[in-house]
Image (cartoon, rainbow, N blue to C red):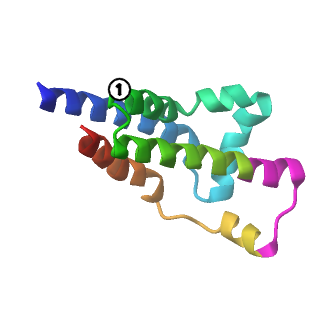
Amino acid sequence: MINELILNYIILFILLELFEISWQKAPSIMGMLLRMHKYYAKNIFLFLIMQPTFYFAVGFAMLSGYDTYALMLLFFKTVDIASKILLLEQVFIKRKLSYDMSLILLAPINGFLPYLGLVFYPILIYLAL
């Protein structure tokens, strides 16, 4: 019974994470930001709705009784969204980037990078239960 519950949570999370990857994936961080900016420019709430793993993390933290690993998952997802919003603001609203930051954002990223969450986060879900 518990193993089935764990598996259901992990499968649900993986499906939600794959959705996020599908609309954010790009060859560089700037490409990812451009894809995110399409939703962010329309409405910040639309952008936030497009982050379903964050809502999963909130619900999972509550359902797990605020387990340490569940709170770690929530913390990482919160930092993820906050850093995306800060980068979007810096790049597209303020339009102030240092030369080094520009190089970082334009550098190609490894193809497996967007999929790291599919490995790391399910481990936290498993440990929380």
Residue 96 lies within the magenta run: yes
Amino acid type indicated by mark 1 = Leu
Q: Is residue 87 visible?
A: yes
Q: Which residue is mark 1?
A: 63
Residue 33, horizontal then vertical, whole percent: 68, 49
Callout 1 environment at 10 Å: few (<14), some (14 to 19), or many (20+)? few
Identity of the residue furthest to the bottom in this view? 100
| Up-down relation of residue 68 to residue 9 (above or below) | below
Q: Quadrant of the C terminus?
A: top left
Instruction: Identify the residue shown where x is 25% and y is 42%.
Output: 126
Instruction: Identify the residue shown where x is 64% and y is 69%.
Output: 107
Instruction: Identify the residue shown where x is 58% and y is 57%.
Output: 27
Instruction: Identify the residue shown where x is 47% and y is 34%.
Output: 53
| Up-down relation of residue 56 to residue 117 (above or below) | above
Q: Is residue 51 left or right of residue 66?
A: right
- Highlighted range, magenta: 87-99
